[in-house]
Image (cartoon, grey):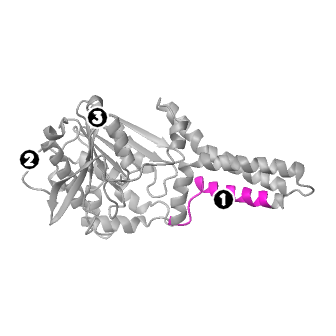
Amino acid sequence: MLKTTTFLLSLLAFLLVIWVIIPAPDYRIWLYSVAASEWSLWLGAFSLIIIGFSVYSAVFGGNGRLWILSLLFSSVAFLISLYPLCSAWNVAEKHRVSLSVSEYFSGLSLEKRDSTGFSTHTYANADGQELKLDVYKPQVKNHNNGASIIVIHGGSWNAGVRNDFPHWNRWLAANGFTVFDIDYRIAPQPNYKTATGDLKCAVRWVKANAAKFGIDANRIALFGRSAGGHLALLTAYSANNPELSASCLGSDEDESVAAVISFYAPIDLLWAYDNHANEFVINGPETLSAFLGGDPHSSDEVRKRYELASPLTHFSQNTPPTILFHGGKDQLVRSENMKFLEKELNDHLVPHRAVYIPYA
């Protein structure tokens, strides 16, 4: 009985951790695989306990060799669980940053979303829809020389809400940044122009209200995740471009920003249409078609939309400094996207940092 139980637990440990390294067969398992990658050390601790049970059953469990399989499955599970840590360690050393074990384990109890710690404002009214943003202000003593960050949520350009990761905003505010976490229009689609136009309205509004919030209008950065990362880059790179104009009227504020930060963003939308990620998790071509209004191979007009909406096509002498993050196991947006943009940033001599995390 002991050996059978230990074997079943070792098999469970293996099945729980294997999704760290293999593609998910559907959306629900993909959601789990993200959690498994981020919290793999907890799974490693579980595997280590099963290794101990396997050895115990070998010594005290009587005849039979089922313990060998138990030891094999739990040992492999333990080794896989270390992959994210080893990868993160190498990346941290390369970029000269430190890792914190205590913060890693305390991070499991993330702060709950609540209505404290920020104020909400309307920054634009677009086609009868109020567009709002949440403002997180830093402590005066930690104020980072008036620097601020406009945060853009992800959601495949058709979902998501502002303030979806409030603990990030609080962390940024604690480090001296004033944070503006914004809404933008996700419907009706195609919304590549309205979403980008809304972001430009947010930049203008923040600049117009710089004195009110005690920030420097020349020290504003955009920060987006996934689809929000794409919009952050597109907004920053196409500042003051009439082809992608602001969706609000009555403001002559400059749309340029001091920097842009992008997490796992689609970069070359034409390439992404033909080279989508895990089709069992997301229908990439369908998502892009909805965002841009069609198949890029159907006409030159639609193809030009994809080109216009790709950050790669908007380099100039005013392209702001850029920070990029992408994970090697991203099953929604392929990591080649970051490499394409990194090459262009190098070629155009734009100050930048690209951080590739193999397990993430």
Q: For mark 2, does the 10 Å Cα neighbourhood hold few (<14), some (14 to 19), or many (20 or more) residues?
A: few
Circles 2, 1 touching at the beta carbon (< 8 Å) = no
Q: Which mark is residue 252?
A: 2
Task: Estimate the x, y position of residue 91 in percent, counting from the top left.
Answer: 51, 36
**Mark 2: which secondary structure?**
loop
Question: In this rendering, is residue 285 above or below 76?
Answer: below
Q: Which residues are magenta?
A: 5-27
The label nearer to you, 2 versus 3, is 3
The label nearer to you, 2 versus 1, is 1
Determine the residue positioned at 26% across, 50% down.
134
Q: Which residue was labeled with disc 1?
A: 15
Question: In this rendering, is residue 157 above or below 52?
Answer: below
Image quadrant for the N terminus? bottom right
The answer for how far apart the CA atoms under marks 2 and 3 are is: 31 Å
Q: Check disc 1 and give the amino acid type.
A: Leu
Q: Check disc 2 and give the amino acid type.
A: Asp
Task: Estimate the x, y position of residue 319 in percent, counting from the top left.
Answer: 25, 40
Q: Which residue was labeled with disc 3?
A: 139
Determine the residue positioned at 44% across, 60% down.
275
Provide the major secondary structure of the magenta segment.
helix
Determine the residue positioned at 37% across, 66% down.
287
